[in-house]
Amino acid sequence: MTAHRPTPPRRPAGRAGDAGLLARAWLGLAAFCARRRAEAELRAMDARELGDLALDRGGIGYAARHGRTPR
């Protein structure tokens, strides 16, 4: 018969969970800012430059969010 191992104690909820939540929020904010900058760069282009990228004015938001044109 093997000896019984007690289960390790659980970490108390609090700071560790809050740090993870804060990190996720920070990453979400960073991603939002990156998408906003990308969209601003695309909106600054003229129609010819957008045409070279196979985009039009209506597809800029989608391309900035997803990195490609809708299929």
Image (cartoon, rainbow, N blue to C red):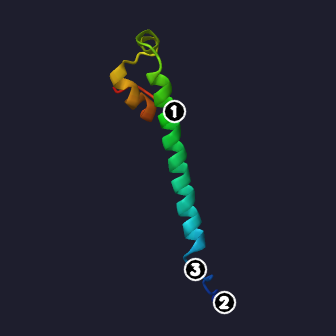
**Relative to the observer, which residue lies in front, 36 or 17?**
36
**What is the three-letter code of the residue carrying label 3?**
Pro
Image disc number at residue 3: 2
Estimate how packed mark 1 is, as few (under 14), some (14 to 19) or many (20 or more) residues with alpha carbons within 10 Å. Answer: few
Mark 1 and mark 2: Cα distance apart in space: 60 Å
Mark 1 vs 3: CB contact within 8 A: no
Q: Position of residue 63 (x, y in %)?
A: 42, 28
Estimate how packed mark 3 is, as few (under 14), some (14 to 19) or many (20 or more) residues with alpha carbons within 10 Å. Answer: few
Q: Quadrant of residue 64?
A: top left
Q: Residue at x 51, y 40 (%)?
A: 33
Please tell me whether residue 55 is drawn above or below residue 9 in the rendered image: above
Which of disc 3 and disc 2 is earlier in sequence?
Answer: 2
**Relative to the observer, which residue lies in front, 45 or 71?**
45
Question: In which quadrant of the rendered image does the N terminus lie?
Answer: bottom right
Which of disc 3 and disc 1 is earlier in sequence?
Answer: 3
Q: Position of residue 39 (x, y in %)?
A: 46, 29
Q: Which residue bears the numbered disc 3?
A: 12
Q: Which residue bears the numbered disc 1?
A: 37
Q: Secondary structure at mark 3?
A: loop
Image disc number at residue 57: none
Q: Secondary structure at mark 1?
A: helix
Please tell me whether residue 48 is drawn above or below residue 64 in the rendered image: above
Q: Residue at x 36, y 25 (%)?
A: 59
**Relative to the observer, which residue lies in front, 47 or 5?**
47
Question: In which quadrant of the rendered image does the C terminus lie?
Answer: top left
Q: Residue at x 47, y 23 (%)?
A: 42
Q: Residue at x 66, y 89 (%)?
A: 3
Q: Nearer the viewer, mark 2 or mark 3?
A: 3
* Left or right: 8 as drawn, with respect to 69: right
Q: Secondary structure at mark 2?
A: loop
Mark 2 and mark 3: Cα distance apart in space: 27 Å
